[in-house]
Amino acid sequence: MDKTFLTWPFFEARHRALFEELDAWCADHLPVAHGDVDAACRELVAMLGRAGFLVHTGADEGERLDVRTLCLVRETLARHDGLADFAFAMQGLGMGAVSLFGTPGQRAWLARTRAGEAIAAFALTEPGSGSDVAATTTTATRVPEGWRIDGEKTWISNGGIADVYVLFARTGEAPGARGLSAFLVPADTPGLAIAERLDVIAPHPLARLSLDGLVLPHDALIGRAGEGFKLAMSVLDVFRSTVGAAALGFARRALDEALARVAARRIQGQALAELQLVQGHLADMALKIDAAALLVYRAAWTKDAGAARVTREAAMAKLYATEAAQEVIDAAVQLHGGDGVRRGSVVESLYREIRALRIYEGASDVQRVVIARSLLG
């Protein structure tokens, strides 16, 4: 693959060293068998933990998450195996609230997820509130023991295999987004049930959760009551850029597969690569990849440089990188002809993997709204 982007001023020597270490590890260990997706994710979390890469999914107390590292790891994993990227990303997103705001007691779970000994999940979405977090209806009511949670969550990544969930519920301090709070919920808590497992075009562990009279102790609250929306947005401010990085990894792999294909495939006595129209497609693919990379690593560098919020930069990175990757992968499928839609081929797998990235953690049109409001505000 083209590694020249590693010379860009966004990166330090430690980032380049991590890339080389991880890329070599991926070449030796990925992809894993995906036949049993739950088992594959458990295996990947354990492997990444043993290799020491999950340490980057959280920060030591008083330290900041390094967003460039998160992006670089996600890009590299995605290029080798989309499920490995998913396993890594959810350890970070799932425990992001604890990493940023957790108490010492709550951080004991973070130590386990960073070691690959426990699987994390981020339970925000509901049937009636995806992008509109303020419409959350799951309730958290104060009781003598602490908090009683009632409601439902859906499209929860790692649902069904997670050991711990960070869950958002309405505590009612104010209307809308200002009345939400975040809670740390062990998966074996009575009242938490897996209501449905969800099957999607690129299989990942996903579930709908039922929360019926689930009682948590007082110290399950993460941060302060009523600050759940602020907490969730702070987590997404860190991790939204990394979705763009994962898309970038998929796009790079698609370009590599396309280059190999057009060099080997011959038509009318010449390689596909010699046709000017094919060269035009390749040029467009490379252009979109570099533009996406610049936006992703600008957002990551800006956050690492100390910016309190990178909402606009992260929205631009996520929007452009995921949309561009969809176009790059579609072009790679086209250049493969019939083989591009053969189930099990690399580009066919990438075609299924990329689609969800344009939806989760803020759909593309939501990112457009975020960018426009930043301009108008």
Image (cartoon, grey):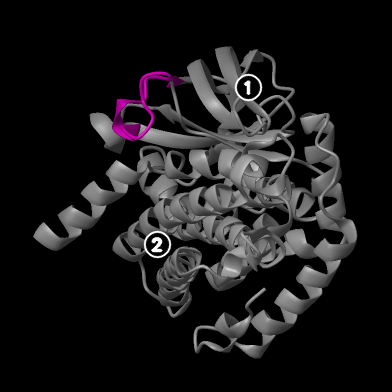
The residue segment tinted magenta is: 127-140
The quarter of the rendered structure image containing the C terminus is bottom left
Q: In the image, what residue type sits under mark 2?
A: Ala
* Residue 134 included in the magenta stretch of the image: yes
- Could you say which is closer to the camera, residue 69 or residue 260? 260
**Considering only order in the chain, which callout, 1 or 2, is on the residue closer to the N terminus?**
1
Q: Could you say where residue 370 lies in the image, as x and y percent from the top left?
A: 25, 51
Q: Is residue 33 above or below residue 201?
A: below
Residue 209 point in image, percent of width and height: 58, 18
Residue at x 57% of width, y 43% of height: 351
Going by the image, does 44 lie left or right of 234? Answer: right
Which is more toward the observer, 282 or 71? 282
In this rendering, the answer to whether 148 lies above or below 180 is: above
Q: In the rendered image, which residue does mark 2 sit on?
A: 317
Question: Which label sits on residue 199?
Answer: 1
Q: Secondary structure at mark 2?
A: helix
For the point 16% across and 54% down, the residue is 373
Q: CA distance from mark 2 to mark 1?
A: 28 Å
